[in-house]
Image: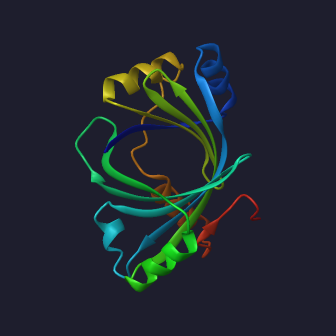
Amino acid sequence: MLEIELKLKVDSLEPTAQKLAQLGAKFQGDYLQTDAYYDDSDDSLINSDRCLRIRRHKNHLGEAIELTYKGARENHRFKSRREIGLKVEKAAELAELFGELGYKERLVIEKKRSLWDYHDCKVALDELPLLGYFVEIEGPDDDTIEQAQKELGLGNLKHIPQSYAHLMEEAIVKTGSKKRKITFGQK
């Protein structure tokens, strides 16, 4: 599957949430997501703009676990890449398998996400420690995504092509921290 998404940095999520509700978007729920990124000792995935991730989704209904591989970015206006996702039941065993294959946990990021359906797009309102607030719009093509961006009143904001993992790596370097698990509970 080809993932096409637009990421925007915002000062607050509330105005976009209000606009989504006003436009009749369907609220899917609030989630706490924990993303664990894996790579080999040579960082061959990150150096080739690819990603291997185990994501834990938690909400009031319980927890779901997903394994995702993302390929290198393709040539589009917005961030586009091949994505393969599988639902899994045992994150610990999957992490152990990765270890046996030479992949180690490189970075863990906690994220609060509110997910909405708007026209043919998924709109995620995200909060991340160290990074702040973002709106991600994922859709079938650049034009549909751009139209949703405008209708949400975000047309003046510039697209951020970097992944959250990349942005977090930059933030970690700036803080001088050696921590590889970035959560909301940290001081």
Residue 176 falls in image quadrant:
bottom right
Where 101 sits versus 62, above or below? below
User: Seen in the image, is 175 located left or right of residue 84?
Assistant: right
Compare residues 58 and 170 and report the one nearer the observer: 58
Residue 171 in the image, given as x and y percentages of width and height: 56, 60
Residue 43 in the image, given as x and y percentages of width and height: 36, 75
- Residue at 37% x, 78% y is 40
Where 61 sits versus 40, above or below? above
Locate the N terminus and report the quarter of the image it occupies. Answer: top left
- Residue at 60% x, 76% y is 178
Q: How many marks?
A: 0
- Residue at 42% x, 85% y is 100
Residue 116 in the image, given as x and y percentages of width and height: 57, 30
User: Seen in the image, is 121 located left or right of residue 62?
Assistant: left
Colour basis: rainbow
Where 169 sits versus 143, above or below? below
Which residue extends farthest left?
A: 75
Residue 111 in the image, given as x and y percentages of width and height: 63, 52
Compare residues 105 and 54 and report the one nearer the observer: 54
Residue 15 falls in image quadrant:
top right
Residue 155 visible? The answer is no
Which residue extends farthest front?
A: 89
Residue 175 falls in image quadrant:
bottom right
- Residue at 65% x, 26% y is 17
Residue 171 visible? The answer is yes
Locate the C terminus and report the quarter of the image it occupies. Answer: bottom right
User: Seen in the image, is 73 located left or right of residue 161?
Assistant: left
